[in-house]
Each structure stands twice: as C-alpha cells, then as structure tokens.
Image (spheres, rainbow, N blue to C red):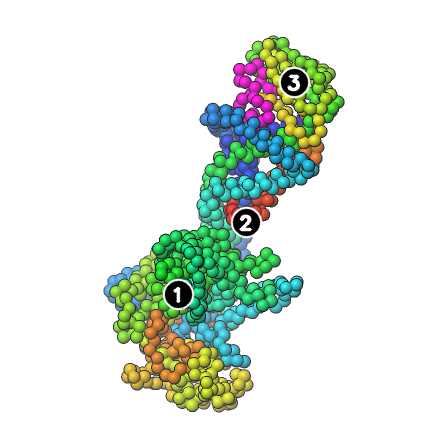
C-alpha cells in the first residue's frame, strides 16, 4: 500500500505546476506566457536571455573597465599624454561652395556657421586635382596626394580592353564553388578588394588606442579593420553590384528602354492589376540562370492609389509618395536568399501606369556584402533607427537626369538620406566622448549637382523650368545644413571637443560639355574607325593610330606601348607628349560663347608623387567655370562636336580647375594655416591627439589652437610640402 | 569585522523584508483578481469545459490508431502553429518588432562601445525599459490566449498525466469534507460491481480515505452518501488512452480549469472534493509530468520553424 501511495504522488507535481502557473498568470503575464503558446513563450525566453546578456555584459563592462582603461592608457600612453583634445568631430558637407556659404552668411541666413566663423575660424580649403569626391576624400582620409592613394577619378580603364572600371573597388566572384548537379554552391565570400591605397588616419589613431566612429566617408568600401566603427559610403554597390540601377515600370511604351543608371520595364495592366518583378543580382548558384527575380503586384484601387504586394508584405501606394524601405528577398535556390531594400514611388495610374523603384540596396540589417566595420555595426544602426540607404550614391541623380523622377521626388531622396545620416551622427556624438567622430552628408553635393540650373540664369537647362518652385532649393539646403551645424555645435560644447565643418570641394555651373575625344581627333591624337562615330566605351577608336583618348571625368590617357594593350606611344616619348597636349589644351577657347573653356591642364607625372602616379590619367584637365567634360566623352562615346550644351538636370559640377572650387573649413578654434588643404586634416587630427604624423603623409597639421586660444602645437608651417602648390596634386 | 557583519545582517534583513513585501503583494493581487474573475469565469468554465472535453474526445478519437507519442507530437506541432498564428493576430507586431530591435541595438551598443562606460549604463537602462515595454505588449495576447491554452492543456493533462486503473489494480480514494464540525457526518461509499472496497473508510483531519480494487473495465461511478447527501465520482478502469478525472472539485474556476471532466460539486455541498489516486502514465516522452515538457519543446520548435513563414515577431 505504501508503494502504491508513492506512485500516486506523481500527480502532485503537475497539479502544483498548473496551479502555480495559474496563480502567476494572474500576477504576472510574463511568467504565464509559457502557458499561452510558443510565440509568447519565445518572447519571454528572449527577453530573459536579453536581460541576462545585458546584465552579464554590464557587469563585465563595469568590472573590466578599469583593466581596459589601464590597457588603453598603457597602449596609447604617449599619444594620450600629448593629446590636446578629448574628442575631434568632423562634419563633412560634401561640395559646400564657399562663395554660396559666404553669401548666405552675409545675408544672415546661416547664423550658426557665422558664429562658428566668428568664434573660431573660417578658411577656404584646398582640394585635390582633380576636385572629385573620391579623389578628395581619399586624400582627406590618407593625408596623401593621389599618387599615394591611387584614386584619380570615379573610373579608370582596363588596360587590356580600354573598358571603364570602377577605380576604388573590385568586386570579383567567389573563387571556389562546389558543384552539385545544376547548382554551384559558393565556398566562400565574393572577392571584394579596396583599390584605394594608403592608411586612413583613423587607423593610425586606433593603433594608439584611440576610438573612431566614421560614418559615410567616401571610398571606405570594403571597410577595413581598425579600432572603431565605420559605415561605408561612396562605391558601396547596390544588390546587383552596380553603382545604382533604378527601375521604372510603365505601360506607356511597348518596348523596354535602357537609361544611364537604370532601366525602363514595360508592363501590362490587366483590369486593375499590374504584375511584374524586381530584378536582383545574378544567380551565381546556377549556371546561366541570369538575374534573380522577385515578383510583385500592384492592385490599382483608385485614381493615384494602389496596393503593392511584394514578398508577403502589403503596402499602400499613393501617387507622389514614397513607400518606406521595403524588404525584398531574392531566392537563389537550395534555401539561399539574398535580401535587399528599396522604395517604391507610384507616379501615375491613369492614363498610364508608372511606378519608380529605387536601386535595390544592400539591407543593412542582413548585409549581403560587408558595408561596415565591424559587420554588426550596420545591423546595430538598422536596429537602432530602422533601415537606411546603403548605396554609395544613394540619391538617384540618374533617375532625375532621365526625367523619370521629378525634382520633388529627388529632393525627397536627398532629404531622407540626410535625415537617416543625422540620426547616425547624433548617436555617434552621444556615444563617443573620447576619440574621433566623422560624418559626411552628401545632400549638399547631390542637390547642387541637380538644382544649379535654377540659380544660373545662363544655364541651358534654366529656361522653361519651374523656376519659382525650386529656385531656393540650394539656399534651403544650405540653411538646413546650417541648422545641422547649430545642433552639432550644441553637442560639442565644452573645451574638450574640436569641431570642424568641411567640404571636399566647391561647386560651379556646368553649362557646356567638352568632347575631348573630338579635340584629340581634330589635333591628330585620336583616330576613329570609319564607323566609329557614336559608339560607346571607345569601341569606335582605331587604336593602331591613336595616341591619346579621354575616358572618365578627370582627363586624358596616353596610349602607351607596353602599358595599354594596343599602345603606340613609346614610353620615352610620353612625357613630351603629355606636355605638348597640356600646352595645347591650356587656354582652349569656346569661340561660340567667347569664353575660355580650359584654364589649364596638368601633366599628372609632374603634379603627383608616389608609387601609384603611373596609374593616373596622363593629363588632368582643369576646366574653366561653366565647363566640364561632356557626357559623351566621359563614357568614351565619340560625337561630331567639340562643345555641347548641357541640357540635363545635372547642371552643377566641380570637376574643373581645382583653384576654382576650393572647399570650406570652419572650426570652433583658431587655425594657424593660411592655406589649409583637405589632406592636412588627417595630420591635424593626429597632431591634436598627440600622435606622430606618419612620414608618408603629405599633409601637415593646420595648427589648431588650444581651448584658451593659444597655439601650443608644432603643427602647421606654410612652407615646404604644405605649401598650396600644384606640385602635390592639391591646390 | 563587526561593521561588515552588521552590513551583511542588515542586508539580509532588508532582502527578506522585500521578499515578504513582494509575496504579500502577490497574494493581495491574486485575491483582487480572483474577486473580479470568479463571477465571470466560474459559470463560463461550466459551459466551456464540456465543449472542450467533447472536442478533445473527437481529436483523440482521430489520433487513436496512432501510437500515443505520435498523437502528442502532432498535437504539439498543431498547437504551436495555431498559437503562433493567434499570437500574430492578437499582438501588436509592429511595436514588438520595434522593441525587439531596440533590445538588439542596445545589446550591440554594449559590444561596439564597450570602452565608453556611460554607453554601458545608458544601454542597460534602455534595455530594461525595452524589456518592460515588451512585457507590456505581451499582455494583450496573454489575456486573449491564456484561457483557451489552459483549457487545451488541461484536456491533454487528463489523458497523459494519469492512466485508468487496470482490472485488479488498487487505488486510494480521498473525500474531503467541508465542515466546521469536529465530528464528521456519517460517510459511506456504496458498493459497486466494478470495484471492491479493501479498506476504509478511514477518517481523519476532515478527510476520509478508502482503498479500492478495480474489477471490471469501463467507466463507472463511485457513489458516496455524506450526511444524507449523495455525491458521485467517476472511476475509469481499462487500458489505452482513456481520459481520467482524478478529482471532482467545487465550482471554483481555478479548480475547474484543472479538472474539467466532471461537473463541479455544488458550493452548498458538504463535500469539498473527491480524489481518486490513479497511477501516473509511465513514459519518458508522454508520461506523467514529461508530457508537458515534450509539449512545450515540440510546440516551441514548431513555432520557431513556422515563425518566418507567418512572419511573426516575438
């Protein structure tokens, strides 16, 4: 009987458990979640885990902090002992033009920058030759002239076939694959190589134990390892591996069309439904599988309204309103998926259906390629603030150029990108109290590129535009940036923080394009094939009789024997030829307009120093105000005219003589240098943190005063290598 | 040393005092909630329990040909998926996703900015807030899904926790009397064809005990005469996955939830409860106490697998 009694006791634990659960359910919903299903069970489980992890990490952080502090102090003792600053903040406003900034300050429209100038300092900032963002920001972050960092333009050329290549990054396929039937499973990561050389100054800081938070500084993709966090910018590709390919779905034409930077896809409307697909990256899992596709459907619910269904999500569409970032998934097979994000913009439902889709970007939450260092930094930002644009050139200038995107639609993209970045920037300022914070805002560059036509009455694209509506777009942008500066200044109050507001170059009008290949042909340096006119990517060039050619924005390449695959110029004659072409180009006049089109041309071998100067264009062209290389010449397409009116929305530019487009440098402290240059800023930061400037850097500290206004740094001297001269490729 | 001892003792006292306070608070809350819920849930369960038992019988009739463990696995998977979907429908998924993101962000902030002590403290504080917020978002699904899930689990419990008596197997029976009198009223277990009384009644402490031995397979009734009142209790004898009601209880909703098969004993009865001590079902997977563990593990795994399909955040 006793034995049986023990057996029957087995019911007691259950009863007690259930009763306990019941009681706890009434008292705390959390504990009862295990009883109301797995969803809530996981929720309570995960919160417990989160709490546990947080508690543990908190404890670890508190107890290990003194050890870390000691180690950090030991490692960076020399640097920190000599540091004259706790925190250095650099706010980059890409392309802020000094003349406009000065004008708006004088008119009282930019009170914060005026205050920064009055209380600290303001200078024009010498940019690089050529004054292009990838070149300039590379010089900024390495402290070197382009001959040492190997970035001379957005594009370079493939010496084997003269085709254009991205200059800063090479994205190759996975080297090893496992073949199983029709599938080829990648056995590793894609081969992504940063072609920019040189060491960023924040890496040097990191070696001395100083933390950096770097947000969207161009030419930082793929991200390099260092002590800090970094979100990559310019040259981060979209999911298709391009620098941004928008899609435009329309019932308008029976044919699909190709635009620069995007494609137009014809769709059929069946009743109220339009079905199509998003085009993703190539499916490398299957041989000859082509691009991966993600189907979507739009049900038109009324004039200018619809419902979008994509990837299991249902999103309401309204004419002229962007959707939030939408998650899209492309399936490669065998359960492998690639995730991206994009925004949709319904432009019309009647009489034609028109839908614009931004380039499909790498999802920062689950990046298909590394866009940050460490890789979880992008995830952190995404979790902290929601999804954000990751594409290097996030604002779709090509869509606006192709007139598939309206001015307001484009401005929305610029404002949204800036707003996303602002959240990141202020989060960094909140988190980093000791170290370096750098953040670059691109809106200034993009808006000036696309809206200059509204402030330049002589611009070919000026007439017929809705001038009133967007005449103040650039001014409003500057005012908005001034407000950003004001809020940044508040976060940088106190003696411990140095704040610099900088731009990598200025801006000017781009009224006329010069087809340099026509000029080269007219002057006997380039020969076209009989049917070569109009062919893109230099396909129409007769290489056997061509000494020089133009590709990209910055200048001219010689067709040198032994370097180019079909070169004809003897290396020994190259330097003389460079000088000859420079002499002829300098002072080139646009007789139709009665203006000088090219103020000067540089022999790159004379202005650059360093191991990579041989990789640059042979001649860097310094255009005069209002001029730039023509659209056609930039992509190696031969026309029959030397000068072309620029009628595109892309109406402002800065790829001209670097003397004409310096950047700006505002600082909350006095600066000793009279002619500071962009590449001096890295050395300046190192100097302020008491870190020796590496000898390879061409820049020198600009000499920032201490908090009390005195100069205790050995810093800047205006002689020697820091003199503002063309000789180092930065004027 | 004396200071340290004093500090330790004072700290211990303070901790005990806090624990006492927390327990008092829990009891007060329970009493308060009971007052509110009892008038609603007690009659409601009177209606729901027979329906649930009927549905349970139907489900188990379908699963009857399969081995017992298969039935439990199938039910667990289905319950996992159904509750997952129900959780999605009843919860604020956007808010949960946002809060979970915030938790993840703050955990990552701890890792990314570990040298900045102020970040550690701020992230900890934000984590705590997010976790509390997440609990708040769970309240609605808990309230909506709690009752159906408990009813479902009780239906499983009456099948897996105990097994019916086998013929010729003995079991104890306990009758609890609800009386303030020191002397119990006359209590008698009437003889029946399905069992033999081997010992009892043995009174003591407001309880009366018997030992019976089952003789005939089937669902039978034990009839008790208590001070002139007749109260019945189900007795199940047989093999297989028969449901058994271990206890017949008063009409109070927490007890009704746990023992759903038999009609509750009226509150004016002299009898508080009658319990048959059935043997526990023996199995490491679906036996007594283990079945609930198996159920939770399988249902959670199912939920984990199907969560991406239903796009559920939890």
Residue identified by numbered label 3: B222
Q: How crowded is mark 3: few (under 14 residues within 10 Å), some or many (20 or more)?
A: some
Up the image or down, B239 lies above or below A504; here it is above
Residue identified by numbered label 1: A252
The stretch drawn in magenta includes residue B267: yes
Q: Nearer the viewer, residue A694 or B95?
A: B95
User: Circle 2 sits in a helix, a strand or a loop, which is it?
Assistant: helix
Q: Distance between the residues labelled 2 and 1?
A: 37 Å
- Residue A291 place in picture, x, y as percent: 53, 65
Which residue is at a point 66% across and 21% down the rendered structure image? B220
* First in residue order: circle 2 vs circle 3: 3
Q: Is residue A566 visible?
A: yes
Residue identified by numbered label 2: B309
Up the image or down, B58 lies above or below A429; here it is above
Question: From which residue to which does the magenta span run?
Answer: B250-277
Query: For residue A583, which quarter of the picture?
Result: bottom left
User: Circle 3 sits in a helix, a strand or a loop, which is it?
Assistant: strand
Which residue is at a point 45% across and 89% down the rendered structure image? A576
- Residue A536 place in picture, x, y as percent: 45, 78
Q: How far apart are marks 1 and 3 (CA)?
A: 83 Å
């Amino acid at each position: 009987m006793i034995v049986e009694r023990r057996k029957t006791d087995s019911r007691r634990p259950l009863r007690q458990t259930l009763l306990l659960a019941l009681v706890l359910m009434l008292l705390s919903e959390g504990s009862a979640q295990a009883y109301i299903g797995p969803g809530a069970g996981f929720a309570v489980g995960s919160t417990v885990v989160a709490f546990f992890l947080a508690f543990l990490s908190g404890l670890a952080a508190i107890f290990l902090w003194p050890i870390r502090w000691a180690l950090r102090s030991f490692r960076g003792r020399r640097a920190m002992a000599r540091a004259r600053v706790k925190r250095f903040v650099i706010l980059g406003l890409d392309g802020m033009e000094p003349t406009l900034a000065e004008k708006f300050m004088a008119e009282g429209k930019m009170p914060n920058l005026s205050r920064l100038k009055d209380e600290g300092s303001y200078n024009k900032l010498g940019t690089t030759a050529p004054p292009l963002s990838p070149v300039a920001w590379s010089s900024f972050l390495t402290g070197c002239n382009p001959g040492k960092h190997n970035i001379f333009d957005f594009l370079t050329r493939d010496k084997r076939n003269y085709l254009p290549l991205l200059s800063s990054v090479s994205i190759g396929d996975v080297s090893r694959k496992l073949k199983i039937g029709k599938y080829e499973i990648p056995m590793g990561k894609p081969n992504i190589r940063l072609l920019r050389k040189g060491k960023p100054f924040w890496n040097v800081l990191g070696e001395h134990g100083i933390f950096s938070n770097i947000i969207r500084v161009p030419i930082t993709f793929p991200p390099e390892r260092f002590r800090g966090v970094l979100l990559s910018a310019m040259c981060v590709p979209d999911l298709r591996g391009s620098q941004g390919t928008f899609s435009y779905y329309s019932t308008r034409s029976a044919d699909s069309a190709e635009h620069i930077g995007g494609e137009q896809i014809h769709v059929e409307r069946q009743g109220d439904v339009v079905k199509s697909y998003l085009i993703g990256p190539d499916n490398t899992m299957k041989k000859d599988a082509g691009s991966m596709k993600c189907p979507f459907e739009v049900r038109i619910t009324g004039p200018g309204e619809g419902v979008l269904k994509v990837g299991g999500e249902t999103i309401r569409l309204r004419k002229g309103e962007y959707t939030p970032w939408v998650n899209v998934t492309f399936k490669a097979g065998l359960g492998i998926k690639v995730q991206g994000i994009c925004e949709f913009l319904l432009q019309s439902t009647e009489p034609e259906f028109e839908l614009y889709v931004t380039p499909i970007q790498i999802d920062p939450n689950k990046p298909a390629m590394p866009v940050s260092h460490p890789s979880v930094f992008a995830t952190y930002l995404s979790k902290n603030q929601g999804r954000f644009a990751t594409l290097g050139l996030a604002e779709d200038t090509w869509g606006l150029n192709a007139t598939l995107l309206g001015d307001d639609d484009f401005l929305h993209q610029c404002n949204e990108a800036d707003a996303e970045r602002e959240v990141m920037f202020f989060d960094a300022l909140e988190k980093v109290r000791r170290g370096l914070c750098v953040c670059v805002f691109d809106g200034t560059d993009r808006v000036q590129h696309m809206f200059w036509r509204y402030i330049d009455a002589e611009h070919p694209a000026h007439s017929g535009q809705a001038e009133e509506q967007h005449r103040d777009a650039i001014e409003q942008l500057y005012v908005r940036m001034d407000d950003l500066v004001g809020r940044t200044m508040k976060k940088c109050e106190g003696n411990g923080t140095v704040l610099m507001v900088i731009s990598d170059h200025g801006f000017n009008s781009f009224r006329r394009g010069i087809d340099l290949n026509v000029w080269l042909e007219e002057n006997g340096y380039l020969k076209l094939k009989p049917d070569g006119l109009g062919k893109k990517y230099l396909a129409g060039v007769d290489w056997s009789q061509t000494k020089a050619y133009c590709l990209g924005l910055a200048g001219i390449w010689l067709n040198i024997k032994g370097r180019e695959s079909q070169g004809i110029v003897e290396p020994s004659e190259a330097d003389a030829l460079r000088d000859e072409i420079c002499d002829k180009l300098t002072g080139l006049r646009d007789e139709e307009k009665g203006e000088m089109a090219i103020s000067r041309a540089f022999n790159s071998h004379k202005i650059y120093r360093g191991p990579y100067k041989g990789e640059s264009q042979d001649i860097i062209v310094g255009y005069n105000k209002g001029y730039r290389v023509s659209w056609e010449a930039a992509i190696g397409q031969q026309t029959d005219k030397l000068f072309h009116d620029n009628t595109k929305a892309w109406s402002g530019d800065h790829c001209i003589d670097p003397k004409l487009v310096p950047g700006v440098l505002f600082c909350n402290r006095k600066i000793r240098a009279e002619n500071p240059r962009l590449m001096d800023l890295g050395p300046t930061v190192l100097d302020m943190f008491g870190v020796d400037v590496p000898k390879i850097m061409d820049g020198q500290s600009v000499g920032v005063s201490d908090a009390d206004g005195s100069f205790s740094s050995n810093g800047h001297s205006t002689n020697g290598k820091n003199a503002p001269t063309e000789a180092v490729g930065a004027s | 040393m004396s200071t340290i001892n004093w500090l330790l003792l004072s700290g211990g006292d303070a901790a005990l005092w806090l624990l006492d306070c927390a327990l008092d608070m829990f009891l007060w809350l329970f009493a308060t909630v009971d007052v509110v819920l009892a008038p609603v849930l007690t009659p409601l369960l009177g209606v729901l329990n027979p329906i649930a038992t009927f549905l349970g019988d139907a489900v188990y009739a379908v699963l009857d040909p399969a081995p017992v463990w298969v039935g439990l696995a199938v039910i667990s998977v289905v319950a996992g998926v159904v509750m997952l979907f129900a959780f999605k429908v009843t919860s604020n998924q956007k808010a949960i996703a946002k809060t979970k993101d915030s938790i993840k962000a703050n955990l990552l902030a701890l890792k990314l900015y570990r040298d900045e002590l102020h970040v550690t403290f701020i992230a900890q504080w934000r984590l705590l807030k997010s976790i509390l917020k997440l609990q708040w978002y769970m309240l609605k699904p808990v309230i909506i899904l709690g009752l159906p899930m408990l009813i479902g689990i009780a239906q499983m419990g009456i099948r897996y926790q105990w097994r019916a008596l086998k013929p010729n197997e003995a079991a104890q029976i306990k009758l609890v009397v609800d009386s303030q009198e020191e002397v119990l009223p006359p209590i008698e277990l009437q003889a029946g064809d399905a069992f033999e009384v081997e010992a009892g009644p043995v009174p003591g402490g407001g309880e009366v005990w018997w030992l019976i031995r089952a003789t005939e397979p089937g669902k039978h009734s034990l009839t008790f005469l208590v001070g002139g009142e007749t109260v019945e209790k189900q007795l199940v004898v047989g093999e297989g996955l028969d449901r058994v009601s271990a206890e017949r209880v008063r009409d109070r909703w927490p007890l009704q939830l746990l023992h759903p098969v038999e009609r509750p004993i009226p509150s004016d009865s002299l009898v508080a409860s009658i319990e048959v001590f059935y043997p526990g079902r023996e199995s490491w997977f679906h036996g007594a106490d283990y079945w609930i563990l198996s159920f939770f593990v399988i249902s959670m795994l199912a939920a984990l697998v199907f969560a991406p399909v239903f796009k559920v955040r939890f």
